Amino acid sequence: MSPEQESPEAQLAALHPDYPEWDLWLVRVYQPRGITWYARRKGEKYARISTDTPEHLIAEIANDDERNPRRGVPRMTCAQR
């Protein structure tokens, strides 16, 4: 079965192991019909990314990782400076 023929749930399950630092989920939208794909870094309160396809989701995650390369590195507190 090609990726286009897989169910959205199966596509989502296949993405989870590749992006362990991200929460990924999808929401079925009825007006207009379709699915919205969401992602946020683990521990964040709100979705950082929303797209219309899993391919766009992967691209946006890659863009976010490039823009925020120091994510996950502890910040120095004022007392440590």
Image: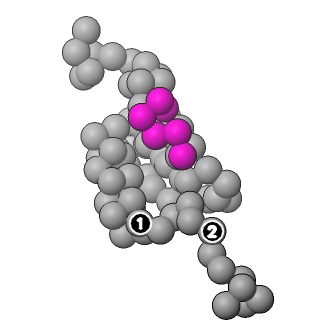
Q: Which residues are magenta?
A: 16-21
> Where does residue 7 sit, x and y in percent of width and height?
39, 18
Residue depicted at x 41% and y 24%:
14
Percent position of residue 35, x then y: 42, 37
| Residue drawn at x 29%, y 50% as measured from the top left | 59
Question: Which residue is identified by label 2?
Answer: 74
Around disc 2, counting alpha carbons within 10 Å, would you say few (fewer than 14), some (14 to 19), or many (20 or more)?
Answer: few
Determine if residue 78 is in view: yes
Q: Give the residue at the far front of this rendering.
A: 80
Residue 42 shown left or right of residue 26 in the figure: right
Question: For the residues carrying marks 2 and 1, which lies nearer the camera in this image?
Answer: 2
Residue at 73% from the left image edge and 90% from the top image edge: 78
Label 2 with label 1: CB-CB less than 8 Å: no
- Residue 37 % position (x, y): 44, 42
First reached walking from the N terminus: tag 2 or tag 1: 1
User: Few, some or many C-alpha atoms within 10 Å of disc 1 (few <14, some 14-19, many ≥20)?
Assistant: few
In this view of the protein, can residue 31 be seen by the observer? no
Dividing the picture into quadrants, the one containing residue 6 is top left
The residue depicted at 54 percent of the width and 53 percent of the height is 40
Quadrant showing the N terminus: top left
Which corner quadrant of the image does residue 79 belong to?
bottom right
For the C terminus, the quadrant is bottom right
Q: Secondary structure at mark 1?
A: loop
Vertical arrangement, residue 40 with respect to residue 1, above or below = below
Residue type marked 1: Pro
- Of residues 52 and 43, which is closer to you in this image? 43
**The residue tagged with tag 2: helix, strand or loop?**
loop
* Distance of label 2 from label 1 (alpha carbons): 12 Å
Tag 1 residue: 69
Q: Is residue 3 left or right of residue 71?
A: left
Callout 2 amino acid: Pro
Mark number for residue 81?
Answer: none
